[in-house]
Image: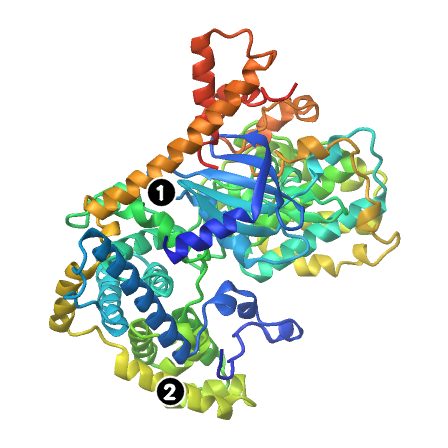
Amino acid sequence: MSMPAQVPQIASPSSSAKKPLYEGSTQYKNWRFSPEKLTRIRASLNAAAVSVIRNTFEADEPGSSSNVLFLTADEEHLLVKLYISKISQLCGHFRFPEEVEATAVSYMKRFYLKNTVMDWHPKNVMLTALFLATKTTNNPISLETYTSHIPKTIPSDVLDLEFLVAQSLGFEFAVWHAHRALWGIWLDLQSLPDTPPDQSQDIYDTATMHVRASRLTDAELIYSPSQIALACMSLASPAFASQWAGSKIPSLADTLQPTIETIKSLITQAGHPPDVESVRTVDRRLKLCKNPEKVVGSKAYLAKKAEEERKAEEKRSRKADEIRKAMENGDPFGDELSWQEKEEKIKEIVDEDDND
Amino acid sequence: MDAVEKANSERQKKWTKDQKVGEGTYAVVYRGREVSTGRKVAIKKIKVSQFKDGLDMSAIREVKYLRELQHQNVIELLDVFSSKTNLNLVLEFLDTDLEMIIKDRTLVFLPADIKSWMAMTFRGLEYCHRNFILHRDLKPNNLLVASDGQLKLADFGLARDFADPGYKMTCQVITRWYRPPELLFGSRYYSAAVDIWSVGCIFAELMLRTPYLPGESDMDQLKTTFRALGTPTEEEWPGHTKLPDYVPVGQFPKTPLRDLFTAASADTLNLLSKCLVYEPRKRIGAKEALNHPYFFALPNPSHPSKLPKSSNMASTRALEEVDGNVDQNVAGPAVKAAAPNRLKRKLNSPGDELASRSIARRLDFSQPKQP
């Protein structure tokens, strides 16, 4: 994993002997990639999904997969990006704090580094990721309120995927955001001895807009929040950015510059929602190539569910048998019970341990 | 099978559950092992399906913070996996907790022992605060002790990040006896100082061997606090009469701590008094506390392995391992003996008690295999 030079966290300089807090985070450890690595991950997820779905099609009806035009990794990514852009619309509607929005966006991106669009449609994942983010950032609302404000959505649409999303995130819910780092830079700037006199709020607002645009890019999967924040500040006001860097990290300011420039061009080039028309075509094609095992009600879905249920039933009856045997072998508690009670007890015990 | 599902089931296979050791309305706790090494662990199974809003907040908080924290004095979350609709937290197995140790009348505490526990508590807490995390439920019951004597902060079900200035937080946190006056007065803007107050109460309890400020209701908690430490004046705590739930509860004189803590050294009482300063902004911080002369004066703190420890707790301890959301009314001699106080210490709603009773009955059935 090739990482450009890190901007030290904007933490207190007194803790310099210890490693920056950010480096202890799960984000630092598990969610940073090189651009090449991101491409590889997406390509291999896509290839794996295509081969699984092709097999499912063939099992259902031989020859049926030959005409299917599966999505490419880039097309999947495009669709995800569209739904990422919808998160901020929804957040505006609910008036969720920025923390919720940013966290939900990160969850979406991380989710699709473990899953593919052909298995899980980004619309549902987006709704679940956002609901989960309200909870993980301590801004919970009831599920009913949440779904009643979203057209054509019922609680189970959100809940059914919650576990899968949490699992895909590795249960790593904490996210470090660029907008927080930007706030830190902004506070720092106000206390610098020789800040430019014209410190209008506009500069901060413009920089914040760039941070929001950066959420539509892969920046957060490649760079640290403070690097992104500095790049956004630099887009808003190169003078402020270099002044901050010069005062906070004089030794790094020059080596950092190429990285900052790369982030800036990433944001300007990719930091806007995709063209809806082109996404619509992708979405239409997705309907034809999504994994039938994940489509509730389809033949493949029912077959899979039946198989799962059969296995669970097998396990339950095995357990019940074991318990029955144990009781019949002169268990002091078992003897006192009538047959009916015994059956009930067995059921209770089995249900109890059912989920292990 | 999806890659994600596969990864989960591989994780699941790394751990086995041996024995159920506790059950509450919110979770079941098992003693278990890591399959490859035989290492003992505690597995907390959270029943998710019962929550209509999905994964519940205390589970989310606990997972969120423990995933990020790694420190000798914070309980380690080894793994998380799901089984059907349950969330399983694999935690390091810890034998006992400070509450059980305090209550074990056969144990004698030396000043050096108390210093050692306090040092470990402050180290764990300083680490949390350095990471901008408030614990918000410190009490002896949540300070767990490993077999090597290391003390660990546990139960992050009420934890949260520091709020930005100007953002409200709830004041309904921290078990009453360890709750600072600013929260009792309804303050919605508070800081790491709330945890420090709790540590002060624990410090006192270690010396007294009984809870220091055992109020019977929120109102009585204020009275109990002021009776012990004197009613705060406007001068020592400016503005406190303007807090949302402020009520005058009577004038109590200040009595020197020395009157109650007759055997304590001057350093000890100085640190204690700094943890129990009314004005939150003047209360000592965790880092500052670690640099307090108390920790540099003789006697040196006891080595963790030399600390007093109950001998027969290991088997019943595992159910304590969990947080305040799990009820403890399950058979077990040590637990039963402590029952009366235990309930009061909980943040649980009264309904929990009823629920757990029926569960406790059911628990008896789960052992028919034992001869």
Chain assignment, label 1? B
Choose between A218 and A130: the one closer to the eye: A218
- Within 10 Å of the Cα at label 2, are there few (<14), some (14-19), or many (20+) other Cα atoms? few
- Quarter in which the C terminus of chain B is drawn: top right
Q: Is residue B174 visible?
A: yes
Q: Is residue A270 left or right of residue B270?
A: left
Residue at left offset 67%, top offset 48%: B152
- Within 10 Å of the Cα at label 1, are there few (<14), some (14-19), or many (20+) other Cα atoms? many
Q: Position of residue A170 (x, y in %)?
A: 45, 57
Residue at left offset 85%, top offset 56%: B297
Q: Is residue A95 visible?
A: no
Pointer 1: what residue?
B54
Q: Is residue B231 left or right of residue A120?
A: right
Which of the 4 image quadrants contains residue A216? bottom left
Q: Name the kind of residue labelled 2 in the image.
A: Thr
| Cα distance between the residues tagged 2 and 1 | 40 Å
Q: Name the kind of residue labelled 1 in the image.
A: Gly
Which of the 4 image quadrants contains residue A266? bottom left
Pointer 2: what residue?
A262
